[in-house]
Image: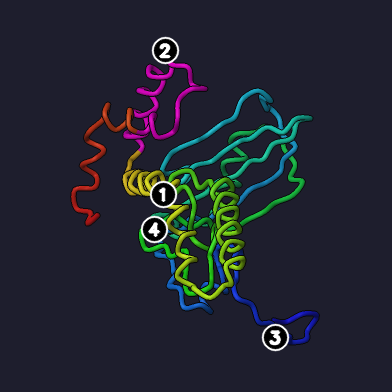
Amino acid sequence: MKEDGRESEYQTKIVIAADGIESMVGRWAGVDNALKLDEVDSAYQYLLKADPLDQECIEFHLGTKIAPGGYAWVFPKGDGLANVGLAITPAIGNNIKAKELLDFFVMKRFKNFSVIEWMTGGVPAFSRRSQLVKGNILLTGDAARLVDSLSGAGIANALLSGKIAGQVASEYLANGGNSPDYLKKYEEEFLKIKGRELRFYSFCRKIYLKMKDEDFEEVIQFLKEYLKDEDSTRLTPIQTLKAILRSNPKLLLLLRHLVW
């Protein structure tokens, strides 16, 4: 390791890698964590002082011209402030940068605004190739690609994966730390809880990336009716997504040439 410009060497029985989407630890361990162009999103976000802004309303904006392969969001924070951002999938973005699309979106959405701060980064998508354990290395969060591939949400999965990795590591060391195969329990435990959900979101993402604006319009019209008689606080994302696919089976045809 390099610390203050000096190289130091440490020996350890286990390493928990939580070093994000670029995960150098994973690469050093020999994990193939390379992402295809359609397995990563480029995101850009502003903290704005903006008007008009409804502090009681969270906004999501969809469309191939607004955010190809992704969406734009407005998350009010009070006092006229909001996180306003956008994510796109570069594989279908025609070389347009997320910042360029966000600037255009902000100018159309708000009459008056001022940028207070900004942030940018890449968001990985979950892959069936994702490897959580290699020898005595445990990968967590974005380093292991444990992200909801449809929404890009990853904090909850990062926290859960870190918790399970810590528990398994503690058990491993308490038992002497002599059997690295025991560490595979981390991957088994995490995927037992989240694997099916992450695979389903990954499946839905492949549909989403092929949707056109008319498809989005049909989904929104369905949701207006579907949510009218439902208690949205009791609905899960998976319930809602399955209802959308049942209402519009032609979306499944978008995957007819996909090897899954």
Along the line of sight, which residue is nearer the eye, 67 or 28?
A: 28
Q: Secondary structure at mark 3?
A: loop
Q: Residue at x 45, y 30 (%)?
A: 236
Total labels: the figure holds 4
Amino acid type for the residue under numbered disc 1: Lys
Please tell me whether mark 1 sits on a helix, a strand or a loop: helix
The type of residue carrying mark 3 is: Glu
Does residue 69 appear in the picture of this structure?
A: no
Which mark lies nearer to you, 4 or 1? 1
Looking at the image, tell me whether mark 2 or mark 1 is earlier in sequence order: 1
Disc number lying in front (3 or 4): 3
Circle 3 Cα neighbour tier, 10 Å, few/some/many (<14 / 14–19 / ≥20): few
How much space separates mark 1 and mark 3, taking CA atoms? 36 Å
Sequence order check, earlier mark of 4 and 2: 4
Image height of 20 relative to 254, above or below = below
Q: Amino acid at mark 2?
A: Asp
Find disc 4 in the rendering and name its residue: 127
Colour mapping used in the image: rainbow
- Relative placement, left or right, of 202 versus 15 is left
Residue hosting label 1? 192
Q: Is residue 223 above or below residue 171?
A: above
Q: Which residues are magenta?
A: 213-241
Q: Name the disc covering residue 9, or none.
A: 3
Marks 4 and 2 close (CB-CB < 8 Å)? no
Q: Is residue 110 visible?
A: yes
The residue indicated by pointer 2 is 229
